[in-house]
Amino acid sequence: MAALGDASRGQAILEVKGQCLNCHRVGENGSRVGPDLTAIGAPRPAAVFFGPPPPAPAPAAIVQQLQRALLDPNSEVA
């Protein structure tokens, strides 16, 4: 099956617009603050997609805290 999408556009979003590499690492590029995204597009076994259901959604307060941290990473730095 052929891959869909525009890899160069995705790379530009990752590196510039999305500022993902400020926290995440892809290959040898980026930071080690957040999870390593190197294998994020790698093929996965069917069990990953057809395994047990994901956990219940996080409480609203946790979701709001995560949104604040992503939108303004310096807002809660002590």
Image (cartoon, rainbow, N blue to C red):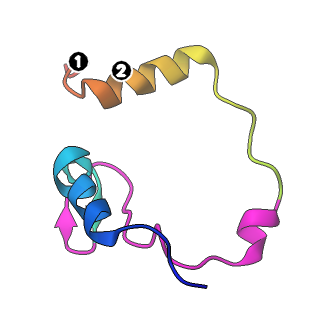
Task: Name the residue tied to disc 2.
Answer: 68
Q: Which residues are magenta?
A: 27-51
Q: Position of residue 63 (x, y in %)?
A: 52, 23
Res 18 quadrant in image: top left
Q: Chief secondary structure of the magenta span?
A: loop
Sequence-wise first label, 1 or 2: 2
Q: Position of residue 51 (x, y in %)?
A: 81, 63
- Amino acid marked by disc 2: Arg
Q: Is residue 2 left or right of residue 68?
A: right
Position of the N terminus, as image quadrant, is bottom right
Q: Within 10 angstroms of label 2, few (less than 14), some, or many (20 or more) residues?
A: some
Residue at point 44%, 73% (across, down): 39
**Residue closest to the eye, 47 or 5:** 5
Q: Where is 26 relative to 33, above or below? A: below
CB-based contact (under 8 Å), mark 1 and mark 2: yes
Give how far apart the Cα atoms at labels 1 and 2 are: 8 Å
Q: Is residue 31 visible?
A: no
Rendered image: mark on residue 12: none
Rendered image: mark on residue 75: 1
Q: Is residue 35 left or right of residue 47?
A: left
